[in-house]
Amino acid sequence: MFRALADPTRRDIFERVIGRGLSVSTLAHDYEMSFAAVQKHVSVLERAALVTKERHGREQIVHGNVSTLRRATELLKAFEEIWIGRATRIAEILGEKGSE
């Protein structure tokens, strides 16, 4: 997921399809790249479970999947708590050694 969002075009696509579905062709109009290149960006986002595609006739509608981002946020918060706890403990240990 983080690799998928590392690219600015993919981040922009993801932001645009959150809350509303857009066709791949609509997305492609706003970028100075080929339709196929936009399709590849969407495929990377889809493999990372950040978007889903739904076929409507000849068009594929791209929808953002916020739940994947929420799960990643929860994971990062858990890691943050672990590292804050470790840094606090290191500071306590160093404080104890400094008072001896």
Image: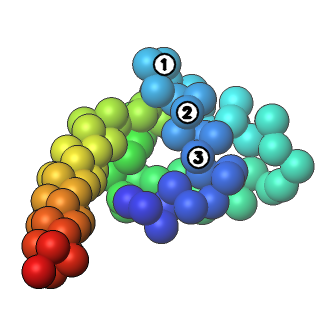
Q: How many marks do you count on the picture?
A: 3
Give the structural element (helix, strand or loop) at label 1.
loop
* Amino acid type, callout 3: Arg
Residues 24 and 64: in front is 64
Query: Can see residue 79?
Result: no
Give the distance between the C-alpha atoms of the residues marked 2 and 3, in whole angstroms: 6 Å
The residue that label 3 is drawn on is 11
Per the model, the C-alpha gap separating discs 1 and 2 is 10 Å
Query: Which residue is found at the position 14% from the left and 66% from the top?
Result: 92
Residue that numbered label 2 is attached to? 15
Q: Amino acid at mark 1?
A: Arg
Q: Earlier in the sequence, mark 3 or mark 1?
A: 3
Disc 3 and disc 1 in contact, CB within 8 angstroms: no
Picture layout, residue 90 above or below residue 81 = below
Figure check: 15 above or below 28: above
- Residue 93 place in picture, x, y as percent: 12, 74
| Front position in the image: 73 or 82 | 82
The residue under label 1 is 20
